[in-house]
Image: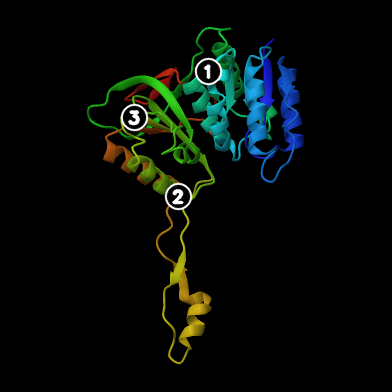
Amino acid sequence: MIRIGIVATSSVVPKVEFEIGVTFLRSKGYSVDVHPKVLGEFMFYPAPDAERAEALIETALRKDLDALWCARGGYGATHLLPHLNRAKAKLKRAPKKTLLGYSDATALLEWFRVNLGWKTIHAPMPSLRTFSLLPENEWQSVESLLRYSLKQTKSPKVRFSLKALHLPKEFKSVEAPLVGGNLFVWNSLLGTKDQGKAQGKILFLEEISENLGRVNRMMHHLEQAGGLKGVKALVLGDFLDCVDTVPSCLVTGPKPGVDLESFLRQPPKDATGPLRTLHSPEDAFDFIFKGVGERNRIPVFKGLPVGHGPNHHSLLLGEKYGLSRNGKFGL
């Protein structure tokens, strides 16, 4: 029986959804131990930063657990990194485990993988409302990777067909470790001592509810900060509810005799309109990431069924994945 410890590292955890998720895990034969701090509330978080870090470290040190699963994402996991760095020597003496999570947990997945050599899985979390309703192939995705990470099974077959957005002429195929996760979180680590290490690797990115203009800005920031230097390929998961938005502006001036100040402060509806063309999410997405590939001579592929939805397949990070020119991608 696989023994799982659940900790809350980011935002407040929804009690009902979480309890349904835990019940589902137990129904699948897992032993589940929920840390007492998971269902607390302190401002935006289940507990203050130091207490969440203490709960994570305490759970990581336990010898009676095989894996740690983050209860949910949100924000706040990066606040724990200084605490983890101070406890690194102690954590290195603990038995290695597997860490599961995604979204805000991206920062923790990278930290535990790089600093402690843990296996880390980009996977849906128990407080996801539809966690117990995952399609069988998506549940098998996380379960097979978890068992493999604990050396209970042979390497699972992870195979996806992706669509190329940009292909340098010289690119044929690549085999390299896979890293990454949520774009915003990965980007927020730039310039810190815990910055993600993507050089010589395949970088995976996904996102939720970000304006595509902000996505564009984040990708330029990632590029200009050196975060794409030496990246072998870029693979894109789901970008759920990421759409283009357009501000309004004046399209006609005031009519003769209309007070200018009043017109500027409260223009009539027929005097305003969109600043520019509203682009479809697909067109805007392709424009952003084709540009990234072209400027950096990096192959870029989209369509990996991983992220916040609608797809929830899992990925074992740090492992070598193969990616061919025709879009075949797998472990």
Instruction: Read off the residue under disc 3.
Output: 231
Secondary structure under the numbered disc 3 in the rendered image: loop
Q: Amino acid at mark 3?
A: Val
Depth order, front residue of 162/109: 109
Q: Please state which of the two labelled residues, at mark 3 or mark 1, is closer to the viewer.
A: 1
Decide: marks 3, 1 in contact (CB < 8 A)? no
Among the two numbered marks 3 and 2 on one chain, the one whose residue lies closer to the N terminus: 2
Depth order, front residue of 54/250: 54
Question: Quadrant of the rendered structure where residue 299 is?
Answer: top left
Give me the disc on residue 214.
2
Depth order, front residue of 282/98: 98
Neighbour tally class for label 3: few under 14, some 14-19, many 20 plus, Cα within 10 Å: some
Q: Is residue 267 visible?
A: no
Decide: marks 1, 2 in contact (CB < 8 A)? no
Q: CA distance from mark 3 to mark 2?
A: 22 Å
Give me the disc on residue 118.
1
Q: Position of residue 91 (x, y in %)?
A: 57, 19
